[in-house]
Image (cartoon, rainbow, N blue to C red):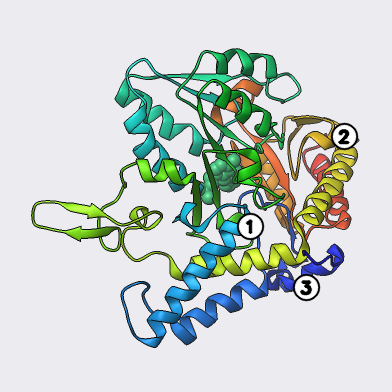
Amino acid sequence: MEQIISLLDVKKDFPIFKQKVNGKPLVYLDSAATSQKPIDVLNTLEEYYKEYNSNVFRAIHTLGEKATEKYEEARKKVASFINSSPKEIIFTRNTTESINLVVRTWGKANIKKDDTILLTEMEHHSNLVPWLMLAKEQNAKISYIPITEEGLLDIKKSQELISKKPKILALTHISNVLGTINPIKELIQLAHRNNVAVLVDAAQSVPHMKVDVKDLDADFLAFSGHKMFGPTGIGVLFGKRKLLESIEPLYGGGEMIKEVFYTHATWNDVPHKFEAGTPHIAGAIGLGAAIDYLQKIGMQNIFEHNQKLTEYALNKLKQVKGIKIYGPLDSKLRNGVISFNLADIHPHDLSTVLDEEGIAIRSGHACAMPLHDKLGITASARVSFHVYNTFEDVDKLILALEKARKVFRL
Ligand code: 7TS
């Protein structure tokens, strides 16, 4: 059972908030890029390196056994967190590597000349560029589910495009620009009725809400540890066991083999056949600690907290003169992310003014250039929330935006 604790208490769990930035208390509004780390995760990393640093799977000594046990325990935590089995959890570096792994293995084997890859217009470059590369190599085609004026997926068009039977539908669960929560369960059902495989980019959803791969029936699902309080350099690819067993490994090397001869080799069982070489042991164990922390707070509490902040921020931002907000204006349709532009102030300039107030936001194209083109802009400013953010943080943001309006004489 997930324990319920007051969300207002959690800032103290994150040591970074003890320091000042530019002489001001840090207001961190860039969690969609990477989240801050709670002390539990930092202590877990230190403990590994100080107390049982050792390689995994290869040593019989005490430290090696403890490291292996903790590494596999982390895999079990990840598996149960998204309701899958440890055999279906591959540790990677990040969402980007997880998606590339699918593209290079399953994609290369299954997508041939004139086949279609179906994406959406709101994909992060991580779920777009690898498919562009594969399409070029295989002479395959790419189609995009369009977005509506409001920043939602066009459901009618989705149905039309899925019924044309692309080989795969690869889509984001939550947009890192628009904040839109896509109806992926319905889209997966529709895709499966048409024999279409589905990859879900869950980089922005797994850190913020309960994601259940069995309930969704996703074929592949990718996410990053660093956006969910874990360390950088550790990510996850979930794949249905049968699918993972049916595809060739991407990297060859130590620990991914069963037997090796001078002439050929055979592969280890899943998931190890996809984890060649020494993995990011500390990272995986740290991610396990991050999951413990997320569960202590409770995923439903986290989701509701972010929804409340998003609603509060949207209402306040709407009142700032000259602002243009992207994505759905109904806060129930989005989560944790708000992108905007303030009159003709360049987002980088805006970010600089906010930084002087200790406020960290993202500015630029947020690794979604085609989406920015579609919106008719080259850049945007973005605020994004996690559990340590408060209504007070939003109030400070609004004051700083008013200050920016004065600095730029609006
Ligand atoms: N997919 C989505 C939806 C993302 O938001 C991101 C990162 C990625 C994939 C890639 O994750 P990575 O861990 O492999 O880098 N998004 C952002 C962002 O919005 N600002 O910085 C990184």
Residue wearing tag 1: 81
Instruction: Indicate the secondary structure of the residue bearing disc 3.
Output: helix
Report if the CB atoms under discs 2 and 1 are less than 8 Å apart. no
CA–CA distance in space, label 3 to label 1: 25 Å
Residue wearing tag 3: 12
Give residue 62's quadrant in the image: bottom left
Q: Amino acid at mark 1?
A: Phe
Residue 335 visible, this orientation: yes
Of 33 and 64, nearer the camera is 64
The percent position of residue 92, horizontal first and vertical second, equals 44, 54
Residue wearing tag 2: 318
Q: Looking at the image, is 127 positioned above or below residue 119?
A: below
Give the position of the C terminus as an image quadrant: top right
Residue displayed at 66% across by 21% down = 147
Q: Amino acid at mark 2?
A: Lys
CA–CA distance in space, label 2 to label 1: 36 Å
Residue 402, disc: none
N-term mark: 2 or 3: 3
> Relative to 39, is 246 on the left or the right?
left
Residue displayed at 65% across by 75% down = 40
